[in-house]
Image (spheres, rainbow, N blue to C red):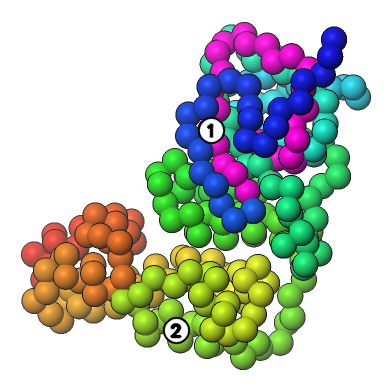
Amino acid sequence: MKTVCLSEKQYYGKLNKQMTLGFAHLSVTGYKSKEKLKKHYHENSYLSLLINGTYSEICKEDTKFISSGELIFRPQSYDHANEFSNTPGRCFNIEFENNFSGINDLKLKLPSRNIHYKGRVFPEIYKAFVGFTEGNNSENIEELLLQWLFEINNTRFPESNIPWINKVKHILETETQYHHSLQSISERVFVHPVYLAGCFKKKTGLTLGRYQTEAKLNKAIQQVFNSKLSVTEIALNNGFFDSAHFIKQFKAAYGITPLHFKKKL
């Protein structure tokens, strides 16, 4: 039987949602119970998280059984076939573009073979899935995927203090009225954006996007305490996309909406 080649962004099953980032394409695909996917390979390498269901992965070497919550990495041109169990399945796919050389400037490499991650590993991938399904900022998702790349490459960062780290923190903490992208920050401190993302997370414990949100919330709660501004005004003053986004982030941080917080004051 002839092996089918699936080109970029092409998958078997039903495409439910998709998004393109700077170096990867994300999608969620759905499959029927007992659906069989004939022998095929993908043009690009990709990482797949099984969200629901179970399936078998049949390849030349062996047969793997994939359960919900598990990950499998498939390098480009890797031949395999799949068969889903008695329940429908859904997969979160992270497909890496062919022009991966932009990240390879920092010697970040994708695995050269197929790998089945059996445990609940790589929390950043699960966070990326949640962010993708909830429509979060694509830059935050991109940072999470970069963290996975740094981790599998065992990237080491300098242990000494790095002057530009404090400059980045100062920008994020004092210019909360703006949204700062990874690219815009990297241009201001003259550091490669991928290196900046990894090093910043290593030094602060937070991604650049999360640190920026925390800084905005810190400034916002001061205004909740010390001003008579409306929730919408506070949201806009601190660079949130809209009041709904501000309310969601505020409630996640403090367990209460900013309006109810103001009433309690």
In the image, is residue 113 above or below residue 203? above
- Which residue ends up furthest to the right in the rendered image? 61
Q: Position of residue 249 (x, y in %)?
A: 32, 59
Looking at the image, residue 206 lies above or below residue 247: below
Between the residue at mark 1 and the residue at mark 2, the CA separation in whole angstroms equals 35 Å
Amino acid type, residue under disc 1 in the picture: Val
| Extreme-bottom residue of the structure | 163
Which residue is painted at 43% across and 56% down in the image?
137
Quadrant in the picture for the N terminus: top right
Image quadrant holding the C terminus, namely: bottom left
For mark 1, what is the residue? Answer: 28
Q: Say if residue 120 shows up in the picture.
A: no
Q: Is residue 34 visible?
A: yes
Q: Earlier in the sequence, mark 1 or mark 2?
A: 1
Res 245 → quadrant: bottom left
Residue 39 among those drawn in magenta: yes
Quick one: label 1, few (<14), some, or many (20+) residues within 10 Å?
many
Disc 2 secondary structure class: helix
Q: Which quadrant of the structure image shows residue 159? A: bottom right
Q: Which residues are magenta?
A: 24-50
Majority secondary structure of the magenta segment?
strand
Q: Give left or right: position of 5 versus 35.
A: right
- Residue at label 2? 171
**On screen, residue 162 above or below 35:** below
